[in-house]
Amino acid sequence: MKKAIVIVVIIGMLGWAIYDFVAPESQDQTDAEPNGAMITSPTDDSDNHSSLQEGDMAPDFELETLDGEAATLSDYRGTPVMLNFWATWCGPCRAEMPDMEKFYQNEDVEILAVNLTSTESSMSDVEEFVTEYELTFPILLDEKKEVESAYRVSGYPTSYMINETGEITHISVGPMNHEQMVQELKEME
């Protein structure tokens, strides 16, 4: 009897492992991996719009900043922009923030960091994160996932490099390091 129970448990575990390996491909959302792997989010393909691509014009938007001010992408026309989608709980997002701050401080570029606010536990988490990392670039709050949806964000972090005329010149799904940011800025020129 004990052998039968052990065999059933082993078969059940094997079945679960196979299901867990295959299932994320058919699900809308994949959970964070303990090793800090990229997080994917649901996408709404019901309206049949294709994903944004390099060469497309960046959709304009208006969001409130962490400081309570309104900011639109078009406010930054004439300046290269790094548009970054991130969350406090995202390990890869945390890893790239110091490089983003260095990039912002040392290059002629504007960074708009769009926090995926609807995924956060609380606003205080966002405020504490900004303080902890000493971030000085604008933090925008996407509370209704409108901008995330417009940009078809499929993983966190995702960055869009946008040139002075508003054209997307590079899309990076996953964290970028300082050298990559500088290289993409140079290629924009």
Image: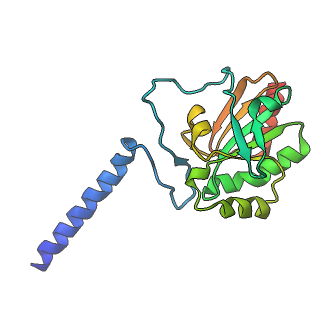
Residue 32: x percent and y percent? 51, 56
Above or below, 19 relative to 109: below
Residue 70: x percent and y percent? 76, 41
Residue at point 60%, 59% (across, down): 89
Residue sitting farthest toward the bottom? 2
The quadrant of the image that shows the C terminus is top right
**Towards the viewer: 154 or 127:** 127
**Towards the viewer: 13 or 101:** 101
Above or below, 13 relative to 185: below
The quadrant of the image that shows the N terminus is bottom left
Above or below, 80 relative to 22: above
**Towards the viewer: 144 or 115:** 144
- Identify the image quadrant of residue 88: bottom right
Residue at point 35%, 53% (across, down): 20
Above or below, 53 relative to 183: above
Horizontal relation, residue 78 to residue 68: left or right: right
Number of labels in the image equals 0
Residue at point 73%, 64% (across, down): 128
Residue at point 85%, 30% (across, down): 79
Residue sitting farthest toward the left? 1
Residue 57: x percent and y percent? 69, 21
- Identify the image quadrant of residue 124: bottom right
Residue 117: x percent and y percent? 62, 51
**Towards the viewer: 31 or 176:** 31
Q: How is the image coloured?
A: rainbow
